[in-house]
Amino acid sequence: MNPKFEFPQGFLWGTATAAHQVEGNNINSDVWLMEHVPETPYVEPSGDACDHYHRYRSDIALLAELGFNSYRFSIEWARIEPEEGEFSLAVLEHYRDVLRTCHEHGITPIVTYHHFSSPRWLIASGGWESAETPDKFARYCERATQYLGDLIGTACTINEANIASLIVEWEFAPPPRQRNKQIWWKATAKALGISLRRLAPFLYATSSKAIDIILSAHHKGVEAIKSASGDFPVGITLALQDIQAVEGGEKRAAKARKAINDVYLEALSGDDFLGVQIYSRVRYGPKGLLPPETGVELTQMEYEFWPEALEAAIRDAVAKTGLPVIVTENGIATTDDTRRVEYVRRALHGVINCLKDGLDIRGYTYWSAFDNYEWSLGYRPTFGLISVDRETQERTVKPSARWLGAIARDNGFEAQ
Ligand code: BGC
């Protein structure tokens, strides 16, 4: 048997969720609206989700009991500031209690201020392509930090700031000029009372100016959090990609790396850490993105089963930013829990290799704590360590949760 690898003292072992995906009834958000317009691409609405808004106490207690010492979750801007400039103290108090519950159970809370969903009023005023949004985001960060800051352990301003660039690069959404043909897109703009041209929800903010606006929101958010006496590390998270070239695809791969990863990595100096999030690798050939390689196992997301992507992403991010890293998301959607264990086992090997080389990695967060609402794909993909009965909300711990929880409790891993 191989000797046990001891992780650094204080290493954060956690799981992650996002408000819209688990809380339920996030009715004031743009995503809820998009779920309900005619011909929506969302296969089902989020509904009650995991009812985490009401069940957070038992959920957090369960995570602690399993052995985890951190929990990454997001606070919901659409609830905290339901109308522009109107802040809900009742909602802030709710999140204070979520944070308090974490501390009661010895869990360090990692709080994300924006995880994809935004208030409808923000999108109605130009959303993530409006030059006014960074200041609005900073004001929200300031108010939330004034109320919650003394209980926050680590903060992420924006989740996957580069997601829209990735959506553009991989043509997951039609180009803006074709949107006038889409009934759901038109219906969303109409419901918000704006023209199609001004519609820019975070996930679809695909114009080139959106990159600057999102990065500026991050920088102003950091400043606001720090000035509201946020005395904890603050960073951003990115959906990094392990972009590999097959013969003849080098130029295309380099271009994609630049657009998806590097534009963002190069803009982060001065942050306290970088949140690395990655699920698989992608390959580029001479004509661009290639389908998954024949023979490679696929996950429920139709991603290649490729846990080694984590090590590659960490090394690349550290080389380009010099920042400490927290793995803020890594995981797999599968119905076969033994494959989840195998995926995480191999991903953790990558983390260990990096730590052995002296890289500053401060935590590993599995996505996700619970089977939850996977955005437009609905509830079918199951990323969770804990399953949730869609009728009764009953939680069932999967073997992978006990396996990873035991590693977390031990802060050690027998690297077989
Ligand atoms: C997002 C999560 C999402 C997960 C799995 C990340 O892109 O931050 O919200 O559920 O990946 O697809």
Image: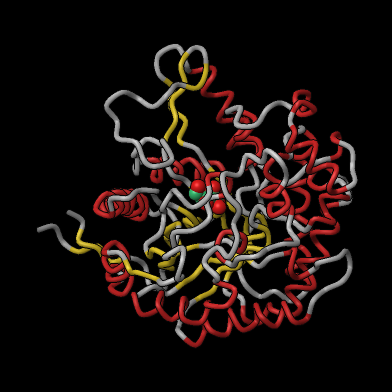
What residue sits 43% from the left and 25% below the top?
283
**379 up-or-down from 204: above or below:** below
Q: Nearer the viewer, residue 25 or 78?
A: 25
* Residue 119 percent location from the top left of the image: 77, 58
* Residue 409 percent location from the top left of the image: 31, 74
Q: Nearer the viewer, residue 213 or 320?
A: 213
**177 up-or-down from 241: above or below:** above
* Residue 243 percent location from the top left of the image: 47, 30
**155 up-or-down from 203: above or below:** below
Q: Nearer the viewer, residue 52 or 224?
A: 52
Q: Quadrant of residue 188?
A: top right
Q: Quadrant of the N terminus?
A: bottom left
What residue sits 51% from the left and 23% below the top?
253
Q: Quadrant of residue 106?
A: bottom left
* Residue 12 percent location from the top left of the image: 43, 68
Q: Nearer the viewer, residue 181 or 320?
A: 181
Report whether 45 appears left or right of 68: right
What residue sits 45% from the left and 84% below the top?
105
